[in-house]
Image: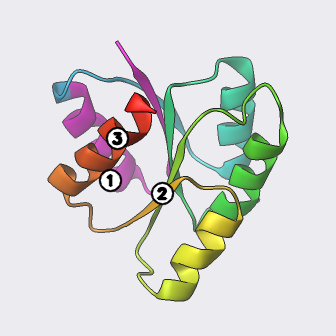
Amino acid sequence: MATILIVEDNDLNREMLSRRLTRRGYAITLAEDGEQGVASVRAAPPDLILMDLSLPGIDGCEAARLIKADPATRHVPVIALTAHAMAADRERALAAGCDDFDTKPVDLTRLLDKIEALMRR
């Protein structure tokens, strides 16, 4: 069973994503901020990370940079999730090392397609 780490500070978003992905057969781990997310990845690298960009402490872009800078975790795909759908937001996320970008509210079918594509790589 593939494991997805959800790094999200909003309780409702974290719970909704967790429930929906669990029903699709994924094991889920959770982090509430960037620091917890980075620590979790270093302790037990998941198969994929869903990273909110607007996090307290270090934001999602900085957390992605730290994950991708570490040789032990750089292979873990990161999908940035944000309510900001501007082209500049996408470019900033990809420049930070995120492998893909998606917007909130989450379109589950679209997100699952992205998750599956990255896991096949």
Task: Identify the magenta region.
Answer: 1-22
Q: CA distance from mark 3 to mark 2?
A: 10 Å
What's the residue type where badge 1 is placed?
Answer: Leu
- Give the mark nearest the N terminus, 1 or 3: 1
Q: Which residue is mark 1?
A: 12
- Front-most of residues 90 and 53: 90
Q: Which residue is mark 2?
A: 100
Left or right of 86 on screen, residue 65: right
Q: Residues within 10 Å of mark 2 (few under 14, many from 20)?
A: some
What's the residue type where badge 3 is placed?
Answer: Ala
- Give the mark nearest the N terminus, 1 or 2: 1
Q: CA distance from mark 1 to mark 2?
A: 23 Å
Determine whether label 1 and label 3 are within 8 Å by CB.
no
Q: Which structural element holds mark 3? A: helix
- Front-most of residues 80 and 38: 80
Left or right of 118 on screen, residue 40: right
- Give the mark nearest the N terminus, 3 or 2: 2
Q: Which residue is mark 3?
A: 117
Q: CA distance from mark 1 to mark 3?
A: 26 Å
Taking the magenta stretch, the answer to whether it contains residue 14 is: yes
Which residue is located at x 16 percent, y 51 percent?
A: 109
Determine whether label 3 and label 2 are within 8 Å by CB.
yes
Q: Identify the disc placed on residue 48.
A: none
Left or right of 103 on screen, residue 46: right
Q: Looking at the image, is 105 positioned above or below residue 118?
A: below
Q: Is residue 56 visible?
A: no
Taking the magenta stretch, the answer to whether it contains residue 118 is: no
Residue 91 rendering spot, x and y as whole percentages: 59, 77
Q: Which structural element holds mark 1? A: helix
What's the residue type where badge 2 is placed?
Answer: Asp
Q: Residues within 10 Å of mark 3 (few under 14, many from 20)?
A: few
Which residue is located at x 83 percent, y 36 percent?
A: 70
